[in-house]
Image: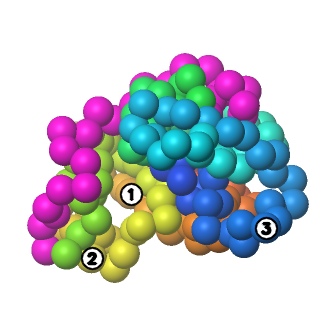
Amino acid sequence: MKPLLLLDVDGPLNPYAAQAERRPAGYTTHRMRPTGWTDGKPLRVWLNPAHGEELRALARLYDLVWATTWKGEANEWIGPHLGLPGLPYIDWPQMHGKAPRGTFWKTQYILEYAAGRPFAWVDDDITAYDREMVEAEHLAAALLVHVDERVGLTRPDFDALADWAAAL
């Protein structure tokens, strides 16, 4: 069984915190209205089509899963722009809620979802507390990849993911 690759959208795939007046090189601008977006104007999302190629290549080593507040809507709004098939997603029991020991709210649910299975998790909100919790409570191998929300996924991130899975 392959390890899981748990993918956040905003930060890793959509570098939302990049300078608003200019999109990062290689990214295209998309205007979206997912269910949770209640602002009057559409949400600006930057996506890099090359990330789709990278993720499809990683799918030989991993089972890809959305680990994003977009939940299943990532299959409608994000995946098609990256050439990804429909992916399973974590259906968070509670979003943005209380988390144990200063961890990010997703961490407890990531561990539940992985259920002892090896996983790599890509997110812009991973902290030292999350790493400590995963190390203490998850007996299988785990790789936590923090991504700068101003930059998004980079070549070294994709290389680290491929190298880690290949070494399992």
Residue occupying image coordinates x 77% and y 46%: 29
Residue occupying image coordinates x 68% and y 39%: 31
Check disc 1 and report the residue beneath it: 142
Residue occupying image coordinates x 39% and y 38%: 36
Q: Amino acid at mark 3?
A: Glu
Nearest the viewer among 5 and 166 is 5
Residue 66: x percent and y percent? 46, 37
- What residue occupies the far front of the structure in this picture? 40
Q: What is the crowding at mark 3: few (fewer than 14 residues within 10 Å), some, or many (at least 20)?
A: few
Residue 47 covered by magenta stretch: no
Q: Is residue 136 visible?
A: yes
Residue occupying image coordinates x 40% and y 68%: 126
Check disc 3 and report the residue beneath it: 21
Q: Which mark is residue 129?
A: 2
- In three-dimensional space, the C-alpha distance between marks 2 and 1, rounded to whole angstroms, equals 14 Å
Residue 47: x percent and y percent? 72, 46
Q: What is the crowding at mark 2: few (fewer than 14 residues within 10 Å), some, or many (at least 20)?
A: some
